[in-house]
Amino acid sequence: MKKREMMKRLPLPRLAIGGALLSLIAACSVEQPWQRPEASIPATFKEAPAEDGAGWKLAEPAEEAQRGQWWAIFGDPLLDELEHQAIAANQDVQAAAARLRQARALAQAQEAARLPALDAGFGATRQRASPASQSLADGAQVPGQTLWRAQAAASYEVDLFGRVGSGIHAAQADAGRSVALFHSVLLALQAEVAQHYFQLREFDAQLRVYQQTVALREDALKLVERRFKEGDVGELDVARARNVLESARADATGVARQRAAAEHSLAV
């Protein structure tokens, strides 16, 4: 009786030792912990006060932060519409969004490696035996049979030396980089649209001023020509007034050309 009990108890310590060894091996990860690179940063700049260094601080990047609709503070409905059109149609933003979705999908696939993999299948096959196998005469009718089969399998990969964990960390880091890149591309597009839009409005204001100047120069030329007919002024005064008018028209044409180029840039 004691001999049987000893034989039954022998496998238990071996299983415990085997499980402990597997746990120990799985805990031995070869992944190197990431450390932020050291960079020499001066304590202060010469423009800042020497006593406390007030007036400046280290930059704190926040590429993953949502910027929101910051251009709404200008209260311009047309700018709002242009920003939404650019976000919806710009190819750089669409490409960055696609890379972000890809990185997130890869991260989810890597995280799924921690879980057991299950596989199941179910199907039917149709077969008909030959008459000879059924000890029947040649040409005998043998009815067909339908075989239904179901199968299932399960697998699990032990994270030896931290391979699965390293893959998950790498995929998460890549997804974080894609998030930061997407928001940076989006912010750059929004800023560029706003910059071109305000430049276009600046040219509009300049063009109105030059158009008013041209109208005033035309009135001044008419007045000088009338005085020339009356004999009050000479031809030199008329020529001078014409020259000033043509100069104003040339300036207005140049501003109109710059405005057209700014509008095309905004459209692109």
Image: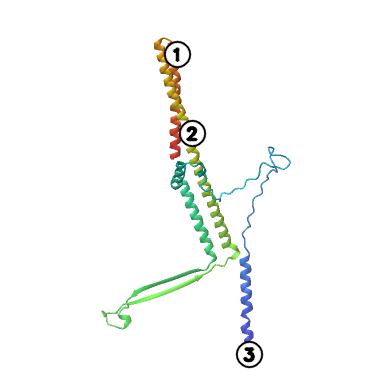
Of callouts 3 and 2, the N-terminal one: 3
Residue under label 2 = 202
- Alpha carbon separation for disc pair 3 and 1: 135 Å
Q: Nearer the viewer, mark 3 or mark 1?
A: 1
Residue under label 1 = 237
The reply to whether dot 3 and dot 1 touch (C-beta < 8 Å) is: no
Regarding mark 3 in the picture, which secondary structure is present there?
loop
Mark 3 Cα-neighbour bin, 10 Å: few <14, some 14–19, many ≥20: few
Residue 124 x, y percent position in the rendering: 37, 73
Residue 21 lies in what quarter of the image? Answer: bottom right
Residue 73 x, y percent position in the rendering: 52, 43
Q: Which of 10/156 is in front?
A: 156
Q: Residue furthest top?
A: 231
- Residue 32 against residue 241 in the figure, above or below: below
Q: Which mark is residue 1?
A: 3
Q: How many marks?
A: 3
